[in-house]
């Protein structure tokens, strides 16, 4: 079966750095997405990786290793507004998105 | 530019009732989809469409119908509501380049409770 694993919850301190991991086992691979979802709101797109390596976008970076079935989202200089759930999704061989359950990130002052 | 508009935001139904969740987008996106989101689970695809007149089933289609008569609109119909359909529903759209869904734009969500 297809599976995406993320930690359920993480806590970090304002101004610090946090890494959210995502491991996947899917039928084929055609890209990995990270979305951010604030409580009670819709998911919004953060990043996309299809080749191995690091993609940097401001305070957020995303890394992919296809051979290990592994990705992480790195958030630097954490702000209170970064408190949200972070969703990992993989596009499989049928080009359908398989979603992880999300990681709830709690930022403390 | 409104993006993806979903209505209603909240709805309470009794078991056996039917209803339609509306979804409209103004970005001329070919691909539209409906997801449900339940606590502790990832988003699950209900139905999707790659263009007007074309629909297909996702992972959890039972109990739901869709139609796509125009590029803009993609309503989701619950035929006979059951408590298991209590969930938050999201409509999402994206451009479609033939290789699959690209970056999704989500509507604000519809919270449905079935008693």
Image (cartoon, rainbow, N blue to C red):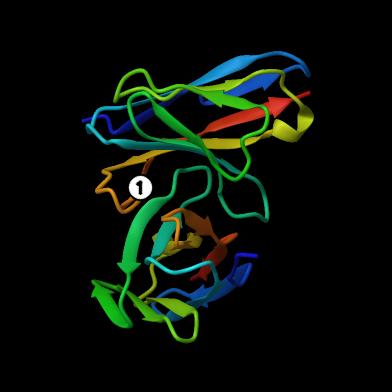
Residue A31 seen from this side: yes
As drawn, B72 above or below A33: above
Residue for badge 1: B104
- Residue drawn where x is 22% and y is 32% of the image: B28
Foreground residue among A50 and A38: A50
Which picture quadrant has residue B4?
Answer: top left
- Residue drawn where x is 65% and y is 54% of the image: B41
Residue A36 % position (x, y) = 42, 57
Residue B34 % position (x, y) = 49, 36
The quarter of the picture where the N terminus of chain B appears is top left
Residue A19 seen from this side: no
Q: Residues within 10 Å of mark 1 (few under 14, many from 20)?
A: some
Foreground residue among B27 and A28: A28
Residue B60 as seen in the image, left or right of residue B54: right
SS of the residue under disc 1: loop
**Chain ID for label 1?**
B
- Residue drawn where x is 37% and y is 80% of the image: A63
Residue A108 % position (x, y) = 52, 70
């Amino acid at each position: 079966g297809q599976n995406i694993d993320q930690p359920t919850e993480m806590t970090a301190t304002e101004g610090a750095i946090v890494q959210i991991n995502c491991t996947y086992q899917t039928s084929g691979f055609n890209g990995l997405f990270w979305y951010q979802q604030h409580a009670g709101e819709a998911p919004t797109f953060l990043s996309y990786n299809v080749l191995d390596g690091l993609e940097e976008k401001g305070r957020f970076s995303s890394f992919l290793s296809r051979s290990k079935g592994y990705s992480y989202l790195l958030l630097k200089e954490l702000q209170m507004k970064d408190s949200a759930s972070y969703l990992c999704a993989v596009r499989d061989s049928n080009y359908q998105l398989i979603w992880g359950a999300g990681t709830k990130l709690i930022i403390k002052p | 530019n409104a993006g993806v508009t979903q209505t209603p935001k909240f709805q309470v139904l009794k078991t056996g009732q039917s209803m339609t969740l509306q979804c409209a987008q103004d970005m001329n996106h070919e691909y539209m989809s409906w997801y449900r989101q339940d606590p502790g689970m990832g988003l699950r695809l209900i139905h999707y469409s790659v263009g007007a007149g074309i629909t297909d089933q996702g992972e959890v289609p039972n109990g739901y119908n869709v139609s796509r008569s125009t590029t803009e609109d993609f309503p989701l119909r619950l035929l006979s509501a059951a408590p298991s359909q209590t969930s938050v529903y999201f409509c999402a759209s994206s451009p479609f380049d033939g290789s699959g869904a690209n970056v999704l734009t989500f509507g604000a969500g519809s919270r449905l409770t079935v008693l």
